[in-house]
């Protein structure tokens, strides 16, 4: 073990206590398919897909070849200035738009998911202001929703530790507390009711995840269609954050397509390049884009950074699109996802300490009780994660919700699913004394 103060890398803290020591042997050295090898030589099944983004595994031949080829042709360009983006940006955007629903047809590439969230929020405020509606500044999200870190994305993220750690973030951001479902009788959801209580005439945008990452809460088609209609009635921009759920995680290109929602802006990231390079996308509806380009040059919206639309990332994204359309990935997600759910439900029946299984596709939360329901609850999910790690399977834990998240690569096999389930079943036994 190495003392953190003597280590040259500033490593982010774990979800639990800050790591005072680091294990060099536990650091990752190699990846193949859905597995990674640490410096100590252990191979582990990565059932968290890196940071939920390595959707096609660590050695996908299409992606590797595309990046290598692009390095020799044009290793850098950007979409932020001077009117000379790489031609590959147009090709990549056309290829992606072909798989998106409704009138979502104009793409702005960014470098990260947090940047895409911030771009969408600021664009919403900008368009309201440009239209003379300067009082529309409020942005609403969901408590426990996750949209990234930083001044704007962190403000919309509904996690209190993010808000407390540096003081004031982006102003006029508010959150609905939940529940995450519609009553089903035509009445307003909690999010809609919270906006009405605030005053919809002062709201610029609503940002939601179709599956709330902090706990795997699945928003129903009814919920999101109702929210879409509500936002249109009140002149509010609906921003659907599919940075995690998009690009195959739930068995299709977008959850938005599956449930028939109609966002003004759609955000993609993570699986857009399978984690091989940093890239995200803000996808605009035709009506939003028309408002934007109708403004005179001196009123245009200026935003961007150095690596927006990086050619290596765009090459990776084209390879991902080719894989998703040609390699049976969606079918595999449906089959492996069904096997995973069935197995998780069977394990929950054997271990009553598991209080819920939530998710869809290859995105599942395994809950160990509602927050605050057990005195030692903060230990449970982290203890389960470590027990599964000891058995060769990597999973995620959450900041507020006592659960682990299973987010394996979309290329996993039936044997990989069985390995995840076996490790979880055994790990629950390993930590039984904590309950």
Image (cartoon, grey):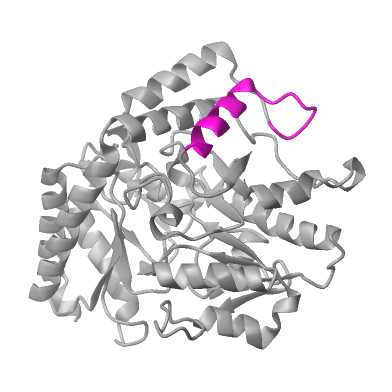
The answer to which of 327 and 304 lies nearer the viewer is: 327
Residue at the far top in the pictured view: 72
Residue 333 lies in the magenta stretch: no
Is 302 displayed left or right of 97 in the figure? right
Residue 330 in the image: x percent, y percent? 29, 43
The answer to which of 106 and 347 lies nearer the viewer is: 106
Residue 384 in the image: x percent, y percent? 23, 66
Residue 94 lies in the magenta stretch: yes
- Number of dots carrying numbers: 0
Examine the image and state in which quarter residue 262 appears.
bottom right
Quick check: 175 above or below 97?
Answer: below
Look at the image and tell me whether residue 36 can be seen.
no
Q: Give the range drawn in magenta.
A: 79-98
Residue at the far right in the pictured view: 298
Q: Which residue is drawn at 72% across and 73% down?
A: 172
Q: Which residue is drawn at 15% across and 45% down?
A: 416
Quick check: 176 above or below 53?
Answer: below
Is 188 displayed left or right of 287 in the figure? left
Residue 194 in the image: x percent, y percent? 59, 84
Residue 219 in the image: x percent, y percent? 41, 69
The answer to which of 101 and 424 lies nearer the viewer is: 101
């Amino acid at each position: 073990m190495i003392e953190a103060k003597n280590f040259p890398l500033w490593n982010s803290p774990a979800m639990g206590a800050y790591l005072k020591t680091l294990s060099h042997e536990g650091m990752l050295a190699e990846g193949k398919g859905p597995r990674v090898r640490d410096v100590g030589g252990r191979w582990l099944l990565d059932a968290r897909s890196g940071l939920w983004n390595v959707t096609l595994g660590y050695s996908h031949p299409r992606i590797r070849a595309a990046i290598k080829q692009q390095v020799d042709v044009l290793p850098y360009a950007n979409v932020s200035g001077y009117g000379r983006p790489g031609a590959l940006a147009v090709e990549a955007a056309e290829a992606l738009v072909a798989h998106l629903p409704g009138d979502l047809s104009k793409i702005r590439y960014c470098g990260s998911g947090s940047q895409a969230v911030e771009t969408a929020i600021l664009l919403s405020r900008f368009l309201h202001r440009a239209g003379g509606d300067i009082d529309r500044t409020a942005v609403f999200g969901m408590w426990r929703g996750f949209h990234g870190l930083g001044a704007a994305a962190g403000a919309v993220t509904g996690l209190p530790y993010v808000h407390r750690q540096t003081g004031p973030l982006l102003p006029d951001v508010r959150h609905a507390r939940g529940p995450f479902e519609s009553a089903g009788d035509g009445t307003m959801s909690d999010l809609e009711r919270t906006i009405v209580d605030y005053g919809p005439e002062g709201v610029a945008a609503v940002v939601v995840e179709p599956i709330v990452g902090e706990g795997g809460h699945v928003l129903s088609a009814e919920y999101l269609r109702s929210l879409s209609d509500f936002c249109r009635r009140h002149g509010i921009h609906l921003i659907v954050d599919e940075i995690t759920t998009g690009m195959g995680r739930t068995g299709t290109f977008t959850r938005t397509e599956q449930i028939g929602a109609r966002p003004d802006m759609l955000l993609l990231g993570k699986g857009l390049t399978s984690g091989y390079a940093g890239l995200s996308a803000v996808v605009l509806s035709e009506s939003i884009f028309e408002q934007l380009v109708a403004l005179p040059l001196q009123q245009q919206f200026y935003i961007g950074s150095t690596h927006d639309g990086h050619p290596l990332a765009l090459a990776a994204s084209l390879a991902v699109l080719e894989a998703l359309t040609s390699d049976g990935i969606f079918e595999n997600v449906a089959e492996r996802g069904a096997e995973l759910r069935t197995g998780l439900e069977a394990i929950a029946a054997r271990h009553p300490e598991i209080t819920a299984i939530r998710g869809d596709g290859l995105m599942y939360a395994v809950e160990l009780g509602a927050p605050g329901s057990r005195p030692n609850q903060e230990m449970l999910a982290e203890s389960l994660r470590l027990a599964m790690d000891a058995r060769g399977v990597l999973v995620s834990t959450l900041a507020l919700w006592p659960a682990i998240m299973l987010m394996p690569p979309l290329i996993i096999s039936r044997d990989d699913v069985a390995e995840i389930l076996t490790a979880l079943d055994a790990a629950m036994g390993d930590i039984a004394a904590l309950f």
